[in-house]
Image (cartoon, helix red, strand yellow):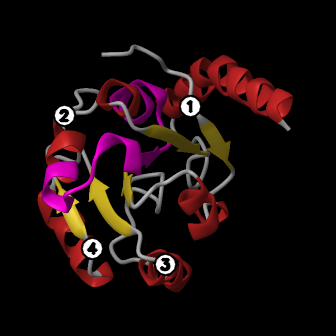
């Protein structure tokens, strides 16, 4: 299993990831973290821009599923039910097992799957270990707590490597 913390691509927010971008890479299944990736941790219900983004993915034949380490399954279950999307809970990221279970449920291969998240040590590492495209976004709401600010600081060099690598490809 590859050990890499560097994302394959980095975006300011989820909305920048278009169906065209995913299709060009052969992606038919987009797995995503929830907290700080799609919504702030305390957000109980999805907003309309998120609903519209997921509808656009579905309209283009891209399956979307949330894969979360969240300990409180009720909030995530309700959030996913509101969106009409599947949910793989207790994922155990950075272990790849939650991503692999979601791929099995969706009938998708590693080559046609991407993982979207905001954290290197869970989301990006799990993506690389599972052998799927690792897509990173800046955390929704930014760093609020002292621990989040430390994590942001630790992630900065890896994000810079990704941005430099992507800059060289263009």
Residue 43 falls left or right of residue 168: left
Region in magenta:
103-126
Query: Which residue position holds label 2?
Result: 92
Question: Residue drawn at (61%, 60%), measured in percent from left and top?
Answer: 17
Label 2 – label 3 distance at C-alpha:
30 Å
Label 1 – label 3 distance at C-alpha:
24 Å
Mark 3 or mark 2, which is nearer the start of the sequence? 3
Of labels 2 and 3, the one closer to you: 3
Mark 1 or mark 2, which is nearer the start of the sequence? 1
Query: Which residue position holds label 1?
Result: 7
Q: Could you say whether the residue bearing mark 3 is in a helix, strand or loop?
A: loop
Label 3 – label 4 distance at C-alpha:
15 Å
Can residue 144 be seen? no
Mark 1 or mark 4, which is nearer the start of the sequence? 1
Residue 150 falls left or right of residue 88: right
Magenta residue check for 32:
no
Question: Residue drawn at (16%, 34%), measured in percent from left and top?
Answer: 97
Label 2 – label 1 distance at C-alpha:
19 Å
- Compared to residue 91, the image places residue 120 above or below, namely above
Query: Which residue position holds label 3?
Result: 60
Q: Residues within 10 Å of mark 2 (few under 14, many from 20)?
A: some
Query: Which residue position holds label 4?
Result: 85
Of labels 2 and 1, the one closer to you: 1
Of labels 4 and 2, the one closer to you: 4
């Amino acid at each position: 299993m590859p050990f890499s913390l560097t994302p394959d691509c980095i975006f300011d927010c989820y909305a920048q990831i278009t169906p065209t971008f995913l299709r060009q890479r052969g992606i038919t299944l987009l797995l995503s973290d929830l907290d700080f990736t799609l919504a702030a941790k305390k957000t109980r219900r999805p907003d309309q821009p998120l609903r519209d983004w997921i509808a656009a993915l579905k309209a283009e034949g891209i399956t979307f599923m949330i894969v979360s380490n969240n300990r409180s399954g009720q909030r995530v279950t309700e959030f996913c039910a509101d969106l009409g999307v599947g949910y793989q809970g207790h994922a155990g990221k950075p272990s790849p097992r939650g991503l692999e279970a979601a791929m099995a449920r969706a009938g998708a291969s590693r080559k046609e799957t991407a993982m979207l998240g905001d954290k290197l040590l869970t989301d990006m590492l799990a993506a690389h270990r599972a052998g799927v495209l690792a897509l990173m976004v800046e955390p929704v709401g930014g760093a609020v707590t002292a621990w989040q600010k430390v994590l942001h600081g630790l992630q900065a060099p890896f994000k810079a490597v990704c941005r430099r690598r992507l800059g060289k490809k263009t």
